Image: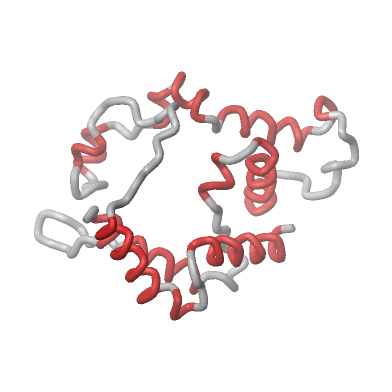
């Protein structure tokens, strides 16, 4: 029943919040737009090589990598500026690194409140935001049915049988557009 899953209508004291399903549908509508890069969260928290490839794709999209001039010319990371940048970014984007430098990754609570960044600003209260321990989320039958029904209503109509098929389409699209 979270607002992120269901969305939140605009009220005098709160801005309109789209639901996750509206975001997914918007991502689908942008599949053919080369000026938009869609990234898969799981690719950034998975194994190191997958994370580095995602960072490489992001760097190419942003135009900050040489995009082939010296990429993969050598396997010697010390002599390859792109690989050095990717390795540093991969290291600095781990949960372990972020937990050591929490203040760099935390929007000031008062600013978030002022800008109405969350319907429930208590979520933004000062405190640790990076979880180092694995925490498996489980859903009861009601929640599972709700998610499945929402997927059928929103995403099956767009051609995605499940989340994995949507992710596969995004990865294929990114590979085509950004190598």
Among the 4 quarters of the image, the one containing residue 70: top right
Residue at 12%, 61% in the rendered image? 11
Among the 4 quarters of the image, the one containing residue 71: top right
Among the 4 quarters of the image, the one containing residue 22: bottom left
Where 58 sits versus 23, above or below? above
Residue at 33%, 70% in the rendered image? 149
Q: Position of residue 102 (x, y in %)?
A: 40, 24
Where 2 sits versus 45, above or below? below
Left or right of 169 in this view: 26: left
Q: Position of residue 164 (x, y in %)?
A: 54, 61
Residue furthest to the right in view is 73
Q: Nearer the viewer, residue 85 or 21?
A: 21
Left or right of 82 in this view: 29: left
Please state, as top left, top right, bottom left or bottom right, where the N terminus lies in the image.
Answer: bottom left
Residue at 44%, 32% in the rendered image? 134
Please state, as top left, top right, bottom left or bottom right, where the C terminus lies in the image.
Answer: bottom right
Residue furthest to the top in view is 100
Residue furthest to the left in view is 12
Q: Nearer the viewer, residue 173 or 157?
A: 157
Check the image and tell me how it is coloured. secondary structure
Q: Nearer the viewer, residue 138 or 18?
A: 138
Residue at 40%, 30% in the rendered image? 130
Q: Position of residue 50 (x, y in %)?
A: 66, 43
């Amino acid at each position: 029943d979270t607002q992120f899953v269901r969305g939140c209508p605009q009220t005098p004291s709160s801005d309109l919040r789209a639901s996750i399903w509206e975001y997914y549908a918007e991502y689908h509508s942008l599949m053919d737009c080369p000026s938009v890069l869609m990234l898969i969260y799981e690719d950034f928290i998975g194994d190191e090589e997958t994370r580095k490839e995602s960072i490489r794709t992001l760097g190419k999209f942003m135009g900050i990598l040489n995009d082939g001039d010296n990429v993969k010319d050598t396997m010697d990371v010390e002599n390859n500026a792109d690989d050095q940048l990717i390795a540093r970014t991969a290291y600095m984007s781990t949960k372990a690194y972020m937990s050591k430098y929490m203040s760099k990754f935390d929007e000031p609570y008062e600013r978030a409140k002022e800008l109405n960044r969350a319907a429930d600003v208590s979520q933004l209260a000062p405190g640790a935001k990076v979880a180092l321990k694995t925490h498996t989320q489980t859903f009861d039958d009601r929640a599972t049915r709700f998610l499945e029904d929402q997927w059928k209503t929103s995403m099956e109509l767009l051609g995605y049988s499940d989340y994995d098929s949507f992710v596969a389409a995004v990865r294929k699209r990114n590979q085509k557009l950004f190598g």
